[in-house]
Amino acid sequence: MNKTDLVNAIAAEAQLSKADAKKALDATLNALAGALKAGDKVALIGFGTFAVNERPARTGINPATKEKIQIEAKKVIKFKAGAELAEAVK
């Protein structure tokens, strides 16, 4: 499912126009991204939790040259599915 498919599904389920469904989805995604940028955790009961995790710097190996390289620390987004979502997917 891509973004267009998701907009169509939202429009059908909520009985909205596709334009309104797209605006709602964009607003939701912007709010989610803003919260994660601020370092907040976003918990959607029944769906799951999005959180920012810090990955420390580490030493890796370039597979082409077998040379050791330094991989910088970075922040990654982690998602943990909620119980209802996990049960629905089974």
Image: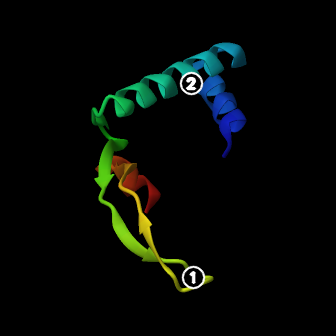
Above or below for 83 versus 90? above
Q: Which amino acid does the dot numbered 2 rest on?
A: Leu
Q: Nearer the viewer, residue 45 or 88?
A: 45
**Left or right: 33 as drawn, with respect to 80:** right
Query: x%, y% of residue 55?
Result: 32, 57
- Which residue shows up at 34% across the image and 48% down it? 84
Tell me if mark 1 has few (under 14), some (14-19) or many (20+) residues whose alpha carbon lies within 10 angstroms of its own: few
Above or below for 37 versus 87? above
**Left or right: 29 as drawn, with respect to 88:** right
Q: Name the residue under label 2.
A: 25
- Which residue shows up at 35% across the image and 55% down it? 73
Q: Are marks 2 and 1 in contact (CB under 8 Å)?
A: no
- Asked whether the viewer can see residue 9, the reply is yes
Q: Looking at the rendering, in which quadrant would you find the C terminus?
A: bottom left
Q: Which of marks 2 and 1 is in front?
A: 1
Color encoding of the figure: rainbow
As drawn, which residue projects farthest toward the bottom? 66
Q: Which amino acid does the dot numbered 1 rest on?
A: Pro
